[in-house]
Image: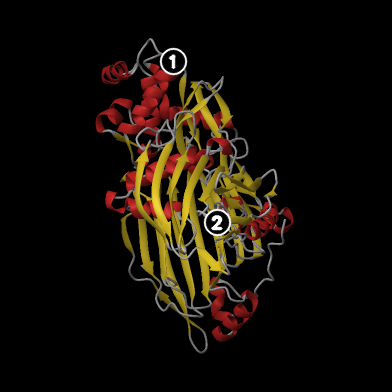
């Protein structure tokens, strides 16, 4: 593990600022220590208080942040606090600035805080709220203070604390205060124990445990990086249970207890299918067909006729809407759509079950973090105990038999009954199923190439293209095709195109386009030089040296490109480049040329088999890229009479 620590800035925090050095001296010292960082978190603390009250554990969370502004940057004065109306409510909020003056700091309180609903086009019935405000006197050298508290309706919904940030962190502490009899566990991620200081004290009847890290370097994200949970040091807090006299309860701590919590939210979905659901299933299925075909028909119907809209409305963010309500309204969130799929397939006796999973933004496995923080999504699973098929109807263009891209590689907690579950892993769809194959047929016209492309796409390549055509206005389709194909150079122009397979997600997407490219043929001394690498997979994916985080791909990929050049009458092909290749278990390419029947063919294949590349993988990627760029700079030579 890399060294996360910086020298500790000897500033007196919070109330001690008034007795520290002069503001200009503190600013100079901070700038010397933190370089060109725009700001530094002097204090980043979370305090979680767990109390026992009338047969349940109450959870209270306090966040305190103190930040020094080191340079001017957009938004330096603005701050937001997010909470909800029901599940995680705002208990208190205080904010102020310590404005530097010649001999000390002047405290100026935030006098206006605006509370409003947090609106999102993708979320319907959203109970999230946001408190927005501006720190007064925010300028270079100002120290801003934020102190707010949240109450949890269910202590099992607690998360934890991120010690690191995108800016330097002077001191970061997680403190857990518990009443007697409350049992707590912490799970650590990306933490070096030698850099963590733990202290436990007893105050009265309460136990106070603190975990502190000091002098953390900023954690820089990069293009195509996985979420911050993959690399920033953090802890999650689990409330395992309590013992109070004769009262005892187990809350969390293992997958069995998490499933028990989850099952309470779906128990009402398991009754007999409503008549309206049964009537619909009877109309779209055929008893004479194999069961899997009827499951496909049901799944495709939900994809095509139910609009995905997220719900974050109190308990509606946790409990699926009834299948008949989703059917009647024709919209639902992931839970409602999964419930409708399972209810409809129950009508034909298929072995389909509700299941929880996490998007790839969440890196945890169920065993290592058995809390609601481990997942954020629901799907259905067909045949979980034999050749499972993962059914996620929120992906309206994903073919039957494939998962959505954002749950590939993730664990799935499948409900098998009141006291039974199983944990499966969603496969990563192999590159061969995510095929794009472009055949370009071209002729020379002066310094231009004119030609056509026949492009076939399957798997996630297909779903991306089909989704794009549905979301973009018809008058903008030609521009979308131009950007998608992007042959040769920026003088690529699409004249016309046709599309097939757009409306059937179970067949390949097929695009035909007719186009031209200007200023791409070089002429000299009776020879023409033509670079046939009109498609250039990989070449724009440049990852800087010194990068500290890996790369996340949407999916694996297999890209085959064939460019066929018709040799002008009377001309002779005098040179074609040698074949070239790069072979690695993670990614590879091959390029070869053929000359026959008055044509020159350039045939390339580019494959990538990983959806997550580590920092170590990037060294091999840079080697591939360097060789590929050299290989793609080579042209064929044609001598004209």
Instruction: Give the Cα distance between marks 1 and 2.
Output: 60 Å
Kindly indicate the quadrant of the structure image that contains residue 546: bottom right
In the rendered image of this protein, does residue 506 appear above or below residue 350? below
| Any part of residue 457 in sight | yes
Q: Which mark is residue 174?
A: none
Please state which of residues 228 and 573 is positioned toward the viewer in this rendering.
573
Q: Which residue of the protein is positioned furthest toward the right in this rendering?
A: 194
In the rendered image of this protein, does residue 479 appear above or below residue 98? above
Task: Assign a secondary structure to mark 2.
Answer: loop
Q: Residues within 10 Å of mark 1 (few under 14, many from 20)?
A: some
Please state the horizontal and vertical placement of residue 73, each as a whole percent of the image.
46, 75
From the image, tell me which residue sits under label 2. Answer: 571
Please state which of residues 26 and 487 is positioned toward the viewer in this rendering.
487
Given contact means CB atoms under 8 Å apart, are the residues at marks 1 and 2 in contact?
no
Please state the horizontal and vertical placement of residue 628, each as a whole percent of the image.
64, 56
The quadrant of the picture occupied by the C terminus is bottom right
* Residue found 41% across the figure and 27% down from its top: 266
Reading the chain from its start, which is encountered first: label 1 or label 2? 1
Please state the horizontal and vertical placement of residue 481, each as a whole percent of the image.
39, 51
Task: Assign a secondary structure to mark 1.
Answer: helix
The quadrant of the picture occupied by the N terminus is bottom right
| Any part of residue 376 in sight | no
From the image, tell me which residue sits under label 1. Answer: 291
> Is 89 positioned to the left or the right of 68 in the image?
left
* Residue found 40% across the figure and 37% down from its top: 397
């Amino acid at each position: 593990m890399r060294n996360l620590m910086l020298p500790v800035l000897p500033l007196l925090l919070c109330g001690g600022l008034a007795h520290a050095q002069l503001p200009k001296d503190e600013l100079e010292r901070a700038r010397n220590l933190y370089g060109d960082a725009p700001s530094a978190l002097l204090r980043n603390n979370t305090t979680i208080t767990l109390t026992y009250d009338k047969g349940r554990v109450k959870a209270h969370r306090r966040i305190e942040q103190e930040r020094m502004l080191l340079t001017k940057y957009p938004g330096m004065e603005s701050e937001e606090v997010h909470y909800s109306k029901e599940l995680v409510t705002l208990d208190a909020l205080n904010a102020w600035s310590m404005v530097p003056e010649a001999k000390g700091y002047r405290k100026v309180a935030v006098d206006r805080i605006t509370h409003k609903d947090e609106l999102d086009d993708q979320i319907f019935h959203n109970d999230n709220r946001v408190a927005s405000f501006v720190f007064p006197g925010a300028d270079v050298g100002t120290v801003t203070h934020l102190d707010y508290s949240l109450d949890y309706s269910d202590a099992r919904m607690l998360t934890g604390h991120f010690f690191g940030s995108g800016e330097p962190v002077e001191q970061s502490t997680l403190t857990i205060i518990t009443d007697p009899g409350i049992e707590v566990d912490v799970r650590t991620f990306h933490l070096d124990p030698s850099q963590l200081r733990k202290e436990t004290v007893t105050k009265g009847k309460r136990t106070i445990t603190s975990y502190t890290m000091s002098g953390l370097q900023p954690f820089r994200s990069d293009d195509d990086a996985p979420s911050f949970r993959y690399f920033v040091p953090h802890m999650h807090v689990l409330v395992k249970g309590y013992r109070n006299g004769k009262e005892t309860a187990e809350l969390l701590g293992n997958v069995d207890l998490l499933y028990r919590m989850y099952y309470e939210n779906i128990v009402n979905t398991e009754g007999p299918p409503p008549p309206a659901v049964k009537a619909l299933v009877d109309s779209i299925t055929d008893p004479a067909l194999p069961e899997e075909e009827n499951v496909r028909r049901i799944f495709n119907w939900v994809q095509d006729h139910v609009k995905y809209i997220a719900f974050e409305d109190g308990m509606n963010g946790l409990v699926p809407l009834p299948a008949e309500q989703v059917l009647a309204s024709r919209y639902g969130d992931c839970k409602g759509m999964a419930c409708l799929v399972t209810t409809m397939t129950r009508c034909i006796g298929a072995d389909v079950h509700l299941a929880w999973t996490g998007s790839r933004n969440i890196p945890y496995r169920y065993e290592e973090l058995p809390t609601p923080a481990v997942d954020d999504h629901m799907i259905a699973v067909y045949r979980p105990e034999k050749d499972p098929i993962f059914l996620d109807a929120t992906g309206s263009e994903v073919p039957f038999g494939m998962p959505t891209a954002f749950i590939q590689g993730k664990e799935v907690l499948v409900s098998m009954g009141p006291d039974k579950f199983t944990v499966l892993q969603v496969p990563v769809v192999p590159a061969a199923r995510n095929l794009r194959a472009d055949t370009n047929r071209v002729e020379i016209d002066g310094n231009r190439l004119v030609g056509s492309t026949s492009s076939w796409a399957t798997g996630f390549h297909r779903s991306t293209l089909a989704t794009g055509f549905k979301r973009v206005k018809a008058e903008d389709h030609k521009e979308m095709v131009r950007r998608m194909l992007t042959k040769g150079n920026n003088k690529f122009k699409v004249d016309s195109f046709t599309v097939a397979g757009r409306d059937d997600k179970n067949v390949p997407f097929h695009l035909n386009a007719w186009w031209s490219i200007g200023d791409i043929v070089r002429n000299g001394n009776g020879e023409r030089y033509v670079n046939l690498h009109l498609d250039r997979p990989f070449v724009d994916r440049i990852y800087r040296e010194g990068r500290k985080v890996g790369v996340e791909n949407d999916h694996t990929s297999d890209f085959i490109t064939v460019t066929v050049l018709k040799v002008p009458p009377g001309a002779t092909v005098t040179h074609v480049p040698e074949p070239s290749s790069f072979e690695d278990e993670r990614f590879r390419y091959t390029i070869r040329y053929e000359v026959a029947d008055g044509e020159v063919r350039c045939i390339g294949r580019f494959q990538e088999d990983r959806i997550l590349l580590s920092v170590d993988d990037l060294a091999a990627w840079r080697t591939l890229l360097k060789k590929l760029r050299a290989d793609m700079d080579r042209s064929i030579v044609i001598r004209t009479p």
